[in-house]
């Protein structure tokens, strides 16, 4: 058995609510390839934790899952209330197929405190055996060597996933995989065809790039019909939109934010500020709910939420707007791939029952179960397993039967096929992302010029980054 003290940097992550930044300076564990002072067998670093780590979890041998027994804890993020029946049935199915095992299901709600909570659990060796976590959390846990190395412990486990997603999610030491992609909601464009027509736009031609979207929004704002082009708050989708314009927030070695002088980033903020000044952006949208879904449902906003799932709410609350909704691909420059920003499954490196934990993690993310979850679970999501996605596209859930949602579903499926993880999403979370949003909002309101706003945001984000390394 191995025993180490948890590095102070991991605890600092929780205090800053910026888990994704752990990798920038190696968290509190030093270089990702030799964190924790070396490896028991040369390839898997020893984690700095305050409890015993079974030697078999970090040696160079694969985990034998042919015989499993005992119990483990499986923790999801915000799924128990709405999807309890589905997962209870799935867990029973696994237990029935493996007599003598018990899966204890717990659920930690999402939100601002999630990252701090799971970091505290990890630092005290109380994290669940199998965890469902989002992008920012998985990166910090990986760089602190707190998750099982799938490449060593379960060779070939990634073969079932969409190659572009699997290849871009190697977040652990030595570029190994420590997380299994589970599900996500690909971004698309949704727009109100009636608003388009009132502004003299072709209702059957959605914008292909962000510049085309801004041009369309400007025409809508100038149509004199009381319509708005685009919702103001960039909180939810700004990073994806910047990515679509080819902007990298981080430098090439992921050690610092370096975007303030990027012409595309400056253009992005400049266009938003011009739209706000011209009245094409609702004035209250910079301070209210960050999701444009409700404003879109009211019927006078050109562009809606870029996630197919919000259409369910539109259909329920304003059938006319829903029926007049058009869809298209998420605006990106040529050569830019769609973003995979989803949920993952990881196994704690401190688990005392690695065979059962690894077998359950592999099982819950296999093609059959990813298809069942995305088709029958009740959520509007897409799987990361290739076979599951193909099957889902050919046999979409009942909600995708009507023309509007069918079109949205097909567009999202196209994006899912080509998606890859965008590393900057993992880093720009919590307080770091808040600094970016707050400064961009100041520029949109005309309080500072776009270049100054971006430079201030970059400086503040790097200050938080430096603090984690001190």
Image (spheres, helix red, strand yellow):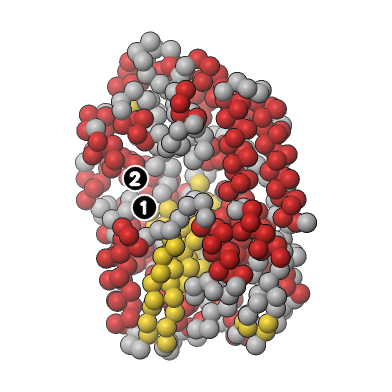
* Residue 257 in the image: above or below residue 143: above
* Residue 273 in the image: above or below residue 429: above
Q: Is residue 363 visible?
A: no
In primary-sequence order, the first of circles 1 and 2 is 2
Q: Percent position (x, y) of residue 148?
A: 57, 73
Q: Is residue 80 visible?
A: yes
Disc sitting over residue 350 in the figure: none
Q: Are marks 1 and 2 in contact (CB under 8 Å)?
A: yes
Where disc 2 sits, the SS reads helix
What residue is disc 1 on? 381
Q: Please report the residue visible at 38 percent of the width from the left and 10 percent of the height from the top.
A: 224
From the image, which quarter does the C terminus lie in? bottom right
Q: Percent position (x, y) of residue 18?
A: 62, 53
What residue is disc 2 on? 309
Q: Please report the residue visible at 37 percent of the width from the left and 56 percent of the height from the top.
A: 389
* Residue 102 in the image: above or below residue 134: below
Q: Please report the residue visible at 36 percent of the width from the left and 15 percent of the height from the top.
A: 226
**From mark 1 to mark 2, how far is it between C-alphas?**
8 Å
Q: Percent position (x, y) of residue 28?
A: 72, 64
Which of 293/189 is in front?
A: 293
Which of 233/91 is in front?
A: 233
Q: Percent position (x, y) of residue 186?
A: 42, 46
């Amino acid at each position: 058995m191995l025993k180490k003290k948890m590095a102070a940097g991991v605890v600092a992550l929780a205090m800053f609510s910026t888990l994704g930044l752990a990798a920038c300076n190696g968290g509190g564990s030093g270089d990702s390839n030799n964190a924790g002072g070396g490896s028991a067998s040369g390839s898997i670093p020893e984690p700095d934790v305050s409890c015993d780590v079974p030697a078999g979890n970090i040696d160079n041998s694969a985990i034998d899952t042919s015989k499993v027994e005992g119990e483990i804890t499986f923790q999801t993020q915000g799924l128990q209330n709405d999807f309890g029946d589905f997962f209870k049935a799935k867990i029973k199915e696994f237990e029935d197929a493996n007599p003598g095992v018990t899966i204890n299901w717990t659920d930690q709600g999402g939100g601002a405190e999630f990252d701090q909570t799971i970091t505290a659990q990890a630092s005290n060796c109380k994290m669940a055996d199998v965890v469902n976590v989002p992008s920012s959390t998985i990166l910090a846990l990986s760089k602190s060597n707190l998750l099982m190395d799938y490449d060593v412990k379960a060779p070939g486990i990634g073969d079932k996933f969409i190659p572009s997603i699997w290849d871009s999610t190697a977040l652990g030491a030595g570029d190994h995989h420590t997380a299994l992609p589970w599900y996500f909601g690909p971004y698309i464009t949704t727009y109100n065809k009636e608003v388009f027509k009132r502004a003299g736009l072709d209702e059957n031609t959605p914008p292909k790039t962000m510049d085309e979207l801004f041009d369309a929004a400007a025409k809508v704002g100038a149509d004199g019909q009381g319509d708005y082009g685009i919702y103001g708050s960039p909180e939810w989708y700004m990073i994806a939109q910047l990515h679509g314009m080819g902007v990298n927030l981080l430098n090439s070695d992921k050690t610092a934010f370096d975007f303030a002088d990027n012409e595309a980033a400056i253009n992005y903020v400049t266009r938003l500020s011009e739209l706000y000044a011209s009245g094409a952006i609702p004035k209250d949208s910079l301070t209210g709910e960050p999701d444009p879904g409700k404003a879109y449902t009211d019927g006078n906003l050109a562009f809606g939420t870029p996630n197919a799932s919000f259409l369910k709410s539109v259909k329920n609350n304003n059938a006319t707007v829903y029926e007049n909704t058009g869809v298209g691909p998420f605006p990106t420059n040529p050569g830019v791939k769609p973003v995979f920003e989803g949920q993952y499954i990881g196994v704690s490196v401190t688990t005392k029952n690695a065979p059962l934990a690894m077998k359950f993690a592999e099982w819950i993310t296999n093609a059959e179960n990813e298809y069942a979850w995305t088709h029958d679970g009740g959520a509007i999501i897409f799987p990361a397993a290739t076979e599951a996605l193909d099957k889902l596209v050919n046999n979409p859930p009942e909600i995708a039967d009507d023309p509007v949602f069918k079109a949205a579903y097909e567009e999202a499926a196209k994006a899912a096929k080509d998606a890859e993880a965008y590393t900057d999403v993992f880093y720009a979370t919590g307080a770091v992302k808040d600094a970016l949003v707050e400064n961009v909002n100041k520029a949109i309101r005309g309080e500072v010029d776009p270049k100054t706003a971006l430079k201030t945001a970059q400086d503040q984000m790097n200050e938080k980054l430096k603090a984690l390394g001190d």
